């Protein structure tokens, strides 16, 4: 007989170890002890709500050690950061190479700002294109958040973002521009055309009877016009902020070199002079233009007053060839700043706290200084300049000088706020009340904030 073959018992797969714990309500017995759940097990709920299962899920990672998947994600993120940094370096290198001929500090900063790179305390830089006819006279100033350009062929306003605001076409042979908070005043010196504008376009147009010698606007929009006259030596007219003629002064006894207007006090100041005297002097007469009465006639000022301007204190600045005279609201002299051996290069009464003078000194070589004089004739600051001032822009709160490939930005107290390196092509600057510097280079405007 053949021996019987033994059947091989099938190999049983190791069964998952299950331990079922009964959940007992109430307080545990004193003689029972809770068993700790092993670290390799997880306690789960079974279908039977009265029981729980302890399931084995394998070894768990050591505390503080990253899982392999997380390590892969971290490495991937690091590689991505390195790629981004390398790309920025390559782009910066390409920019430096492409602009190596015209590269300067503000163009580099403009590029960095455009790709979102700034650093703490650094000024924001932006730029926009501006088409100009360089064969014409171009005058620049800032009206609120816009750049104003007055040329021989018209008036143009562009927002500081580069968006065109409006453009008006007309012809001026000798354009003059004055910007105030409320309006913009333009006129053609020696001709008969005057126009005012605001942020929307031309506001008023006037053709005078006689050629215009000067015109001044105050902060509220009233303005005065000085013209020649057929029957008098000069004529002055006052228009209110609604562009209505409210007063006329005909000067029979003296010529008028300049005028100024203060709407708050309703006063018109006139600088009158006579040519027949042995020594030329100027008398400032103050008139209440509502009643036509002469309020004050100040003591004579030696020389010809070339510029007369009301200041924020209600007094007047009168500039001659050799001194700055400071007059009170009653016309009396509060103080005088003599230029001495220096020559006046530029002057401005735009500062909120005084007047600004640029003086050239010839005693020890040629040097310049910037002097601020307050409304009582006292010197607020005097700053030596190491080079010729190519252009000057002044607002009520800021001073901007273009000096030797640099734009120097000061506040109204003469404190230096920023030094901006510029290229040789920059010829004009402008500044806003918020101390935004505008650098005008050929057909591009750079705004430094």
Image (tube, rainbow, N blue to C red):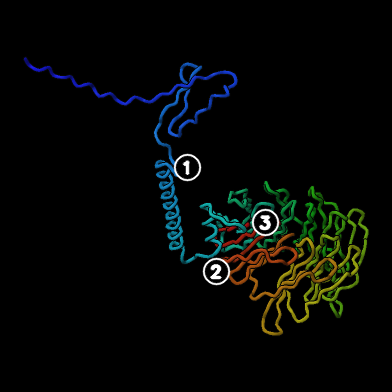
Residue located beneath label 2 in the image: 424
Residue 37 shown left or right of residue 143 in the figure: left
Q: Which circle marks residue 63 in the picture?
A: 1
Q: Is residue 214 left or right of residue 102?
A: right
58 or 407, nearer to the observer: 58
Viewport quadrant of the N terminus? top left
Q: Residues within 10 Å of mark 1 (few under 14, many from 20)?
A: few
Q: Position of residue 374 (x, y in %)?
A: 81, 67
Q: Position of residue 281 (x, y in %)?
A: 85, 75
Q: Position of residue 407 (x, y in %)?
A: 62, 66
In the current view of this chain or complex, which residue is farthest to the top? 1
In the picture of the structure, the residue carrying the numbered disc 3 is 142
- Which type of secondary structure does the marked residue at label 1 adopt? loop
In whole angstroms, how far apart are the C-alphas of marks 2 and 1? Answer: 65 Å
Crowd tier of the residue under label 3, counting other residues whose Cα lies within 10 Å: few below 14, some 14–19, many 20 or above: many
N-terminal of the two: label 2 or label 1? 1
């Amino acid at each position: 007989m053949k021996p019987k073959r033994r059947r091989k018992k099938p190999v049983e797969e190791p069964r998952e170890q299950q331990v079922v714990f009964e959940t007992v309500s109430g307080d545990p017995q004193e003689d029972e002890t809770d068993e700790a759940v092993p670290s390799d097990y997880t306690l789960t709920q079974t279908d039977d709500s009265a029981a729980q299962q302890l399931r084995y899920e394998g070894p768990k990672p050591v505390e503080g050690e990253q899982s392999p998947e997380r390590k892969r994600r971290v490495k991937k993120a690091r590689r991505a950061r390195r790629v981004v940094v390398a790309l920025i370096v390559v782009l910066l290198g390409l920019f430096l190479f492409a602009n190596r001929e015209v590269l300067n500090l503000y163009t580099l900063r403009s590029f960095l700002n455009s790709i979102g790179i700034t650093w703490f305390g650094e000024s924001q830089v932006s730029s926009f294109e501006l088409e100009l006819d360089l064969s014409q006279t171009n005058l620049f100033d800032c009206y609120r958040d816009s750049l104003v350009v007055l040329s021989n062929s018209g008036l143009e306003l562009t927002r500081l973002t580069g968006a065109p605001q409006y453009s008006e076409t007309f012809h001026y042979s000798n354009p003059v521009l004055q910007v105030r908070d409320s309006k913009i005043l333009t006129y053609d010196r020696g001709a008969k055309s005057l126009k005012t504008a605001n942020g929307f376009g031309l506001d008023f147009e006037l053709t005078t009877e006689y050629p215009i010698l000067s015109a001044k606007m105050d902060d509220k929009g009233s303005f005065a016009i000085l013209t020649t006259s057929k029957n008098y030596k000069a004529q002055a007219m006052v228009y209110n902020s609604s562009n209505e003629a409210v007063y006329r002064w005909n000067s029979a006894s003296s010529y008028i070199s300049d005028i100024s207007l203060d709407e708050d006090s309703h006063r018109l100041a006139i600088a009158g002079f006579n040519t027949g005297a042995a020594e030329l002097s100027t008398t400032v007469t103050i008139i209440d233009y509502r009643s036509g009465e002469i309020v004050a006639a100040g003591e004579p000022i030696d020389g010809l007053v070339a510029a007369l301007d009301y200041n924020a204190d209600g007094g007047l600045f009168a500039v001659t060839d050799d001194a700055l005279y400071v007059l009170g609201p009653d016309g009396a002299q509060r103080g005088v700043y003599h230029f001495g051996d220096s020559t006046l290069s530029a002057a401005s009464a735009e500062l909120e706290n005084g007047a600004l003078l640029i003086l050239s000194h010839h005693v020890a070589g040629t040097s310049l200084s910037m002097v601020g004089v307050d409304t009582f004739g006292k010197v607020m600051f005097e700053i030596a300049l190491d080079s010729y001032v190519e252009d000057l822009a002044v607002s009520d709160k800021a001073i901007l000088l273009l000096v030797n490939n640099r734009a120097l930005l000061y506040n109204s107290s003469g404190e230096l706020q920023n030094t901006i390196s510029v290229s040789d092509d920059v010829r004009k600057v402008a500044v806003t009340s918020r101390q935004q510097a505008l650098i005008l280079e050929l057909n591009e405007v750079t705004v430094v904030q």
